[in-house]
């Protein structure tokens, strides 16, 4: 588990506006009101019965912009459902998948020493430290489309996905949407609630 992997299975929801963090604070399983620019959060969107409809890695790119990285097969229904709850909040939700490149960094390609959830910015790229897999550091690299991709040995998407399994952090996808409550996936233990 060493190198750089493109992540076409992930998509990005952009939440923009002065109420973006407050809106998400009321909709997801995480405290977005206190989220700063140096951290990311693991979060879930729940149904009225408390079942997970989607899971996210979420972080701020600026004071009025939050990005939600989720499984691409859940993006459209999640965006539609979340948009129903905006009402009077000054927040606009859009599918920003085409606006960003996503890469997984593992082993020598990933930054070392930072704890899971730490976020750093290198130019226009945001790097979110993820939980390690089999002792190997991992990170999510997100930058605007057209940016120079991160450097490192090529890593297949299949190996990256295996690393996600080995990290113990579940990313919800369409086949298992609404099959779990957050506690069934240990979200309370890994900072997702």
Image (tube, rainbow, N blue to C red):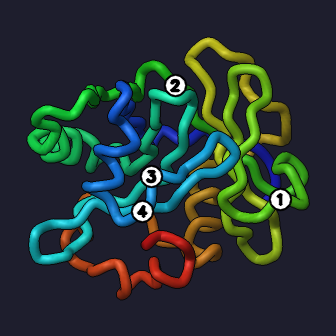
> Number of labelled discs?
4
Residue at which label 3 appears: 32
- Give how far across and how far down residue 92 sits, in percent: 26, 26
The image quadrant that residue 138 belongs to is bottom right
Looking at the image, can residue 172 be seen?
A: no
Disc 3 crowd rating (10 Å Cα; few below 14, some 14-19, many 20+) is many
Using the image as rendered, state which of residue 143 and residue 91 is in the foreground.
91
User: Which residue is rendered at x = 34% and y = 45% of the image?
Assistant: 22
Callout 3–callout 4 Cβ contact below 8 Å: yes
Q: Horizontal placement of 103 versus 58: left or right?
A: right
Circle 2/circle 4 CB separation < 8 Å? no
What SS does tag 4 mark? loop
Residue 114 is tagged as: 1
In the picture of the structure, the residue carrying the numbered disc 2 is 100
Query: Residue drawn 22% across and 66% down?
Result: 46
Q: Nearer the viewer, mark 1 or mark 3?
A: 3
Residue 70 % position (x, y): 40, 49
Labels 3 and 2: the sequence-earlier one: 3
Earlier sequence position, callout 1 versus callout 3:
3
Q: For the residues marked 1 and 2, what is the alpha-carbon distance in whole angstroms?
A: 24 Å
Q: Image check: 155 left or right of 74?
A: right
> Looking at the image, can residue 124 be seen?
yes
């Amino acid at each position: 588990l060493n190198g750089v992997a493109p992540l076409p299975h992930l998509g990005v929801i952009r939440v923009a506006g002065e109420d973006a963090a407050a809106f998400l604070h009321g909709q997801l399983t995480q405290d977005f009101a206190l989220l700063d620019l140096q951290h990311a959060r693991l979060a879930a969107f729940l149904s009225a019965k408390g079942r997970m409809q989607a899971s996210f890695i979420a972080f701020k790119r600026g004071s009025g912009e939050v990005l939600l990285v989720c499984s691409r097969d859940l993006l459209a229904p999640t965006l539609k459902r979340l948009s129903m709850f905006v009402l009077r909040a000054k927040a606009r939700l859009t599918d920003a998948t085409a606006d960003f490149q996503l890469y997984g960094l593992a082993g020598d390609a990933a930054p070392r020493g930072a704890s899971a959830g730490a976020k750093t910015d290198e130019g226009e790229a945001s790097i979110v430290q993820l939980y390690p897999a089999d002792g190997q550091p991992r990170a999510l690299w997100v930058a605007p489309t057209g940016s120079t991709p991160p450097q490192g040995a090529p890593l297949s998407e299949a190996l990256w996905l295996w690393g996600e399994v080995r990290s113990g952090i579940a990313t919800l996808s369409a086949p298992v949407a609404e099959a779990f409550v957050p506690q069934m996936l240990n979200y309370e233990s890994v900072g997702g609630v």
